[in-house]
Image: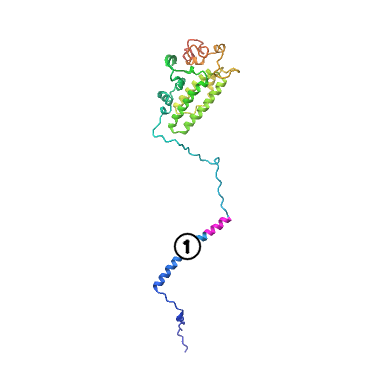
Amino acid sequence: MPDTTPTPQSAAPAGNQTTVSTDQLATLLSSLQTISTALATHIVPTAQAASASSISQAYPATTPAASSPESSTSFPTIVSTAAPSTTAMSLPDYFHNIEPSVLLDIARHKFEPSDLYKLDPQFRDKEERTRIELDGDNLAIKKTRGSTEDYSSLESMHPPLYTYFMILSTFALSSKSLDVVHQINSGAWRYLTHLSQLNAKFQWPAVLSYHLEYHRIRRREMARGDYSGWGKVDDALKSEHLFGQARTPNAKTSSKKTSPRESNSETCNLFNKGLCTSPCKYGRTHKCSGCGSSDHGKASCSKN
């Protein structure tokens, strides 16, 4: 009967066997771990860098063009080299040559347009003089250093009017509203231009009368918080104050005086507003434009 017992495999020759102790095996595993870490740290990133380099060569990156100032939508911040103020500033600090009570009237929108001379340094050292003014329905005697009669031309009224707008704009800064400051500054520029255009076409006393009423209307608007009216043309006021007061074709600047014959034939608009005393500084006739009486102006006429 054949022997079915499995034959053991032949063992390897004794010379080819390697015996590893437990300590040697631990040392070998530690070395393999060190090699594996080195491969992950150095070789792989190098391959990735090489791959990225090849991609950048195939598709070179383009440097974005620097945006021009015209195409930029952001505005630079104002940088000032002035040292920041450590104390709060008020209107009298900025306009120290103007009475605080006048500054307060401007801030409260109670400044009377006919008091523009109070913003003019040339009247600061003048002696007070007595003048008669219309106060409602009554005549009042007031002492003053100046009046609208001192402004015989637009050029002479420009400095105090410009000062008025500077005070108004400076006060508006306290509101921290850019819209209000812009309305005042741009409106002032348009209005001064508007006055110059009117002065070129119409006689100065009529333009002055237009200005005084125009300013009073703007003052009432500003008291309600509306500063958008400056610079707008008031056609109704133009019809009331400038109609029939056009300059003659040969008339030049507002400082040129009209002849006595021309002046005497014209009615003084300022007298009818109660703003011109007799005799008329401009040589015009002082009589009521309503009833024709020389005793009073239209503002105090009982027949109106």
Image check: 264 left or right of 300?
A: right
**Residue 98 found in image quarter:** top left
Whether the magenta-drawn stretch holds residue 55 is answered as: yes
Say which amino acid is labelled 1.
Ala
Q: Main secondary structure of the magenta part?
A: helix
**Residue 220 found in image quarter:** top left
- Seen from this angle, which residue lies furthest bottom? 1
Q: Which residue is mark 1?
A: 40
Residue in front for this viewpoint, 74 or 146: 146
Which residue is at a point 41% across and 72% down the rendered structure image? 24
**Mark 1 Cα shell of 10 Å, populated few (<14), some (14-19), many (≥20):** few
Residue 291, given in percent of the width and then of the height, sits at 51, 11
Question: Could you tell me which secondary element the residue under label 1 belongs to?
Answer: helix
Count of numbered marks = 1
Report the span colored magenta.
49-58
Residue 110, given in percent of the width and then of the height, sits at 43, 23
Residue 53, given in percent of the width and then of the height, sits at 55, 57
Residue 160, given in percent of the width and then of the height, sits at 48, 23
Looking at the image, residue 234 lies above or below residue 4? above
Image check: 250 left or right of 273?
A: right
